[in-house]
Amino acid sequence: MELWKIILLVSAVVVTIGGLGFYIWVRFWIKKYRKKMNDGNSILDSKINRPNGGDVDMNLKESLGSKFDIFDLETILNFLYRNSFRKIKVIGDDSIFITLSIWKQLQFIKITNPEFDNELIEKVKNDFPDYREFINEENSNDYDALIINKSKFDYNKTYDTFIKDVKEKGTLIIVENSNNLIKEDFESLQKHLNYLKEHHETIKVKNKITFITKNFN
């Protein structure tokens, strides 16, 4: 057999094995993820997903230079949709992309972002007509959900600082992709939440996401 044919055959086998391995890994991850979400005590019930799942605006992401993971965003979007949350707040890194993505996907939501750059928002509205109707709501302290990405604080201070802005049965959502949110801090917060009997769940998508429901019990 000619050398180039051997090389092509070997390459095809390697690609096939690699693709099969990736497929098996994805199936395993989905199965594990759904098992976690379908836990009877879970606040992350995966039986209901929004109808426009997977329809995140990648052009907006590229335009804003956002590094926020799409799978993390999809997880948060589905959580907000399932719970029919109407009033949320977003802070932290990449907050503009997260805010506009949530608004576009779930237009029944009123959303607040205290860190908005007005000039940048006007540019986005000019470049992307779909966002021209967006309104940044006034700040308050009774949100159905507060999302914080890449907190400046450790876990305990993040919880203490922001949980007060979440109403009863509302949820504080902490996305861990910061050096301040280290393992020891996370374990300390878990102990604190267990002591308070505050319902909380953590899942690993791209990053670790912790959902804390205020006075759930």
Image (cartoon, rainbow, N blue to C red):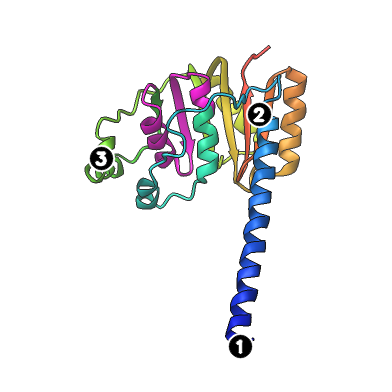
Dot in front, 1 or 2? 1
User: Where is residue 184, by image quadrant?
Assistant: top right
Asked if residue 215 shows in the view, the reply is yes
Q: Which residue is mark 1?
A: 2
* Disc 2 element: helix
The residue positioned 60% from the left and 32% from the top of the image is 158
Q: CA distance from mark 1 to mark 2?
A: 53 Å
Please state which amino acid type lies under the numbered disc 2: Met
Q: Tell me the tag on residue 125.
A: 3
Q: Residue 168, position in %: x, y? A: 57, 13
The mark nearer the N terminus, 3 or 1, is 1
In front here: 59 or 88? 59
Question: Is 204 within the magenta?
Answer: no
The residue positioned 62% from the left and 28% from the top of the image is 211
The mark nearer the N terminus, 1 or 2, is 1
Please state which amino acid type lies under the numbered disc 1: Glu
Q: Which residue is mark 2?
A: 37
Query: Which region shows up in magenta?
Result: 79-108
